[in-house]
Image: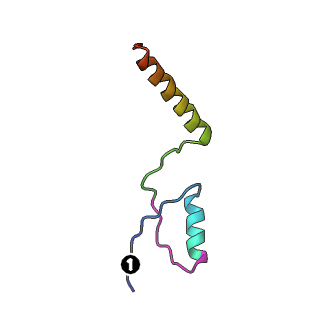
Amino acid sequence: MTHANFLVKVTDATMPQVRKALQAAGIEVRSIILVHKEKTETQEDSEEIQEEKKDEAKGEESGEN
């Protein structure tokens, strides 16, 4: 028997969900550790940021700032 460590990146899943999915696939899970968590932009956030960048660019072109 060998032990292996894998890094799995998921979107919108919790550690228990990942554990259950791996176990359902017949994979013995010894441990799951959260290494990094970040909030991602939603579509609305992304559009808002793009509008802000456009406004900033217009201000720089007109000599503001």
- Dot 1: what SS? loop
Task: Give the position of the N terminus as an image quadrant.
Answer: bottom left
Residue sitting farthest toward the front: 61
Q: Is residue 48 above or below residue 36?
A: above
Residue 19, relative to residue 14: is it above or below?
Answer: below
Q: Is residue 61 above or below residue 54?
A: above
Where is residue 35 drawn, in percent x and y? Answer: 42, 55
Is 47 placed left or right of 29 in the picture?
right
Q: Which residue is mark 1?
A: 3
Q: Is residue 38 on the magenta stretch?
A: no
Q: Nearer the viewer, residue 54 or 27?
A: 54
Name the image quarter holding residue 2: bottom left
Majority secondary structure of magenta residues: loop
In magenta segment, residue 30: yes
The residue drawn where x is 55% and y is 60% is 15
Q: Residue at x 41, y 69 (%)?
A: 6
Q: Residue at x 54, y 42 (%)?
A: 41
Indicate the amino acid at tag 1.
His
Crowdedness near tag 1: few (<14), some (14–19) or many (≥20) residues, C-alpha within 10 Å: few
Picture coordinates of residue 55 (x, y %)? 51, 23
Residue 60: image location, x then y, percent: 41, 19
Image quarter of the C terminus: top left
Q: Which of 41 and 20 lies nearest the eye of the viewer?
A: 41
Q: Which residues are magenta?
A: 24-33
On screen, residue 48 versus residue 62, left or right, reads: right
How many marks on residues?
1
Q: Residue 45, image x and y in percent?
A: 57, 36
